[in-house]
Structures are given as structure tokens and as C-alpha cells.
Amino acid sequence: MALNALERERLKRDRRNLGLLLSPGLFWLLLFFAIPLLIILVYSFMTNGPRGNVVFAPTLEQYATLFTRSVYVNAYLRSIWMSLLTTGICLLIGYPLALFIVRQPPRWRTPLLFLILIPFWTNFLVRIYAWQIILANNGLINTGLAALGLGPVPLLNTEGATLLGLVYGELPFMVLPLYAAIDRFDFTLLEAASDLGASRWRAFTRVMLPMTMPGIAAGSVLVFIPTVGQFVVSELLGGAKVDYLGNLIQRLFLRSNPPNWPLGSAMAMMMMLVLLALILLYFRATTEEDR
Amino acid sequence: MSAAQVQRAARGAARPAVERGRLTWSGLSLTSFAVLIYLFLYVPIAILVLFSFTQDEFGVRWTGFTLEWYQRLFADERLMGATANTLYVAFASTIVSTILGTLLALAMERYSFRGRTATDAVLYLPIVIPEIVMAVALLAFSAFAFDIVRALFGINLRRNLTTVIIAHIAFSISFVVVVVRTSLKNFDRRLEEAAADLGANAWNTFWRVTFPLILPGIIGGALLAFTLSLDDFIISLFLSGPGTSLLPVEVYNKVRRAVTPEVNAISTLMLIFSITLVVLSQAVQRREGR
């Protein structure tokens, strides 16, 4: 009986402690994360007023615009395509690089990994800007070409420059999870596979690739998500010649006169929906390979 | 020869064969590939740093050494003001998000409760949502909240550094939670039990045993939050009002126009600052590893 009361007292104290630990953080995230998302969800079904104010008249007009106007449809396709390309290239570069680091003797591994971490922690804007110096018409490459008597090649303000900047910016986010996954991989399994008669390629695709899939999935998602919403790289290196989702959303909220928050909100919501669908598809595909 | 010795000898003999296997064509090409990628990562940064010291007024070629651009930088009051604002925002948001994130991490690792899985999902959302979505959501929210305040109290609020701080906290709490949870997972709970057996109450156990042991994790989380706030451009762009400039936004506005040696110089300083922070966070983590 006494023990029971003691136990009950302890449980009560535990629950009170849990409440004290959880409530400040959850309150903050509710007020400044969940409710803001809810607001743009509601705005996405509203009408845009003549002065760019949100008029509370429910409509599906914004979503209809997204699906019918070619500017928006193209922006979705272009953003997704560019993100897929970026993710694919980062994976193709990142996997061998992570494998290389794992294979080094331990005393080399830390500094090599550290060299990946530095760009990871460095200002994204600054790193993208560095490419302007190289690619500009009066930049390094074109100066070099001019010295050889070759005319300036437009490198900056092209889609190629955007892709280059995205790969450059996101590569560390791919390498780190890949490193973690490959580091856990037991390389003697490859020897076992080859003892059992598998070719090196077959051993790689049937043993190593599936076993490092969690790292591939994590890295791909980490690269894909920010790339879909980017607008900095396409503006600084692509010259904002074509519209990506991020550029359009930014314009609708900040630059257009009048602004169009309902349409911008609908674009943001649709972007999240597309991302969610693609990520679910991706995870389903990568876990199926596991079986 | 004992069985163990035979085994050791066999293992010793097997290893060089494996190593030799790796030192074939594929091993060499992997190394040269890795060297190329490291060059790809670092040559642009090296060029940026180099061209912050060039005399060339366009900042794109080497015409001789000068510190002029750094001097101009420190004389640029607008830029210095933006730097001060950015540091203030970063410190304020780091303190709050570290405290809130650490409390959440303790709750998630030490308690099982109904809705724990849902809370877990909510905590991961700010990490996986594209930053621009969070930025426009917070912009819409601030406008909405300001309208309500105006209607209720007749006060006109404007976006300023405080709105940026609030947004940065919301953005970085989840990252702090992830880092602190990792160090709580590696934590030997028997140490707490031992402290309790020796008569320490819960409060003393936490401050004397748990807190010092997870402190490296907390510092690591704080450094991450600090860097996120310092580097954040997108949320700062949407949430800072007129007249409250932040460094990344200032740099962006300059960079959009053209390459200038001043921007090279400010970028170099930001780079040095970031590298210092990584070195610090690595040092902290190594201490934790011991």
C-alpha cells in the first residue's frame, strides 16, 4: 500500500518533469512553425486582393493557376529535373569519394573527413560566389582563354553554371551520410562474395550497394530537398534567366507589385506535396531493393 | 606453434594480399579521382581568398598585393552594422534554441510517453522542409500576427531583428535536439544509478553527473545552431524588416551586382570564422569521444 503510494508519487513527479522538459520547445515549434505552415495552407485557398492583400474568399483558383499556366508547370518540372540531376551527380561523385576516405588508414581518415566538413559548415552564399570569380566573362577561365587568343565563352549565367554550383554546394551533404554507411560496411563480405564466384561488379551491386543503401537514401534526400527550393544558385550563377520554384515563390512574396501571397502559398504547399510524394517513392524503391 | 599463433600468422599473411589487391589499377584511379574532387572543393575557395588581396579593382585577376579592401571593409559602416546585427541574432537564437533543444532531447531520450512517435516526427519536420517554405510561412505568420496586434491594441509592429531571432530559434531547435540526443544515447545510465545509490537526489544527479557528461553534445548543438543562424540567408531575407540589415543579406545584394574585391574580402573573413567554428566543434566532439 505504502509502496503503491510512493510509486504513484514518483509517476506524478515524472509526468510533471516530462511536461517541464517538453512544453517550452513544443510550444515554440507549435507557435512559430506549425501555425505558420497552417496559415500558408489556408492562404493557398484564398483570393488575392487588388493591392496584394489576402482576401478571405475561398477559391481553388491558385491551384488551378499552378496546373494550367505554363510558367508554373515548367518551373515544377525544371526544378525537379535539376534536383534529380544534382542528386545523381552528387551520388556518382560522392560514393567513390566516401569509399576512398573509408579505405584510408585511420590517421588519414579524420583530416580527410574534416576537409569535407569545412565546406559543410561554410557559408553557402560565399561558396557559390567563389564560382563567379572563376566563371565571369572577365573571370579566371575566360582570362586564360583570352591569353591563348580564344574569345570569351559565356560560362556564367548559364544553366550549366547553375548545375555546377548546386553540385558544388550540396556535395558535402551527400558525402557525410555515405561515409557513415560505408564505414559500417564489412569489406570481408566482398571477399566472401568473390570466393563464391561473384565478379567484382556483381559483388558491388548485389552486396555492397544494398548494404550501404541507408546512406545513399539519406544523402539523396539531404541533397534533393534544399535543391528543389533553391533560388540563390540560379540567381547568382544562372543569371535568373529561367524560373525555378524558389525564384517564383520569392518573387510572388517579396518582389512582385502587387505581391501575390495566395499563389505563392499554393506554390509552396504544392512543392512540399511533390517532395513528400517523391521521397516516399524513393524510400519504397530503396527498401524494396533490400529484400 | 600454437593454434593461436597459426591463426595470427595466417591472418598476417592474408592481409598483405588484400592490401596488394587494393593497390591495383582501381585503387590508384580512386585516389586520383579523390584528389580531383578535393581540388574541385578547395580551388574556388583558395581563389576567393587570394583575390581578396589583389590590387585589381574588379577582383578577378592578380595585379599585386594589397590590404586596401579589408581597410575599406572596416570603414564601411553599413557592413559593420550588419555584422553586429548578425552576431547579435546568432547569439540570441543560439542561447534559446540550445536550452529548448536540450530539454526536448532529455524528454525524448529519458521518457516514454504517449505521442512520442508523433513528437519525433514533428521534431524532424523543420530539418526536412525546404527553407523557403519555412521562410514564407513565417513571413505570412508575422504579417497575420501584426494585424491582430494592431486590431487589438492599436500598436504597429514591424519586422526587425527580433522576428529574425524568433524564426532562427524555430529553425534550429530540431538540429540541437538531434545533436544532444546522440550524446544522450552514448551515455552510460549506470552512472546516474550509481549517483542515486550514493544518495544524490535527482537534481544533484543531473547537475553533477548527467550535465557534465552531455555538455560536449550541448556545446556541439550550440555551435551548429550558431553556424546555422550566422549562415542563414533565406529566412533572414524574408523576416528582416527595412533598416535591419543582416550580413548574408548585405553580401547577397552586393554579389548580385558584380564581383568586387570587397566582397572577396568579407567572404574570406566569413570563411575564416566558419573554419574556426568547425575546428572548435571537432575539438569538442573529440573530447566527448574520450
Image: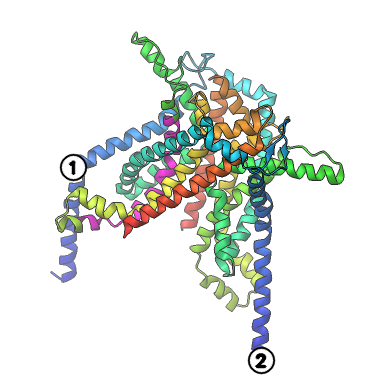
Q: Residue at x 59, y 23 (%)?
A: B254
Q: Give the left or right position of residue B28, taking residue B58 as reference.
A: left
Rendered-image quadrant of the N terminus of chain A: bottom right
Residue type at the position of mark 2: Met
Density class for disc 1 (Cα within 10 Å; few <14, some 14-19, many ≥20) is few
Q: Is residue A152 above or below residue A213?
A: above
Residue A241 appears in the picture as rendered: yes
When asked about the image quadrant of residue A166, the answer is: top left
Marks 1 and 2, how far apart in space?
74 Å
Badges 1 and 2, same chain: no
Name the residue furthest right: B154
Name the foreground residue: A248 vs A178: A248
Q: Where does the magenta region start and end?
A: A163-191
Disc number placed over residue A178 in the picture, else none = none
Is A177 part of what is drawn in magenta? yes
Q: Is residue A195 above or below residue B135?
A: below
Q: x and y percent of residue A34 in the render?
A: 64, 52
Name the foreground residue: B44 vs A221: A221
Q: Residue at x 44, y 52 (%)?
A: A280
Indicate the secondary structure of the residue bearing disc 2: loop
Q: Residue at x 43, y 34 (%)?
A: A168
Q: x and y percent of residue B109 in the render?
A: 55, 65
The residue carrying mark 1 is B24
Indicate the secondary structure of the residue bearing disc 1: loop
Residue B49 appears in the picture as rendered: no
Name the residue furthest bottom: A1
Q: Give the left or right position of residue A215, taking residue B32 as reference.
A: right
The residue carrying mark 2 is A1
The way the protein has been coloured in the rendering is: rainbow
Q: Nearer the viewer, mark 1 or mark 2?
A: 2
> What chain does badge 1 belong to?
B
Q: x and y percent of residue B120 in the render?
A: 55, 60
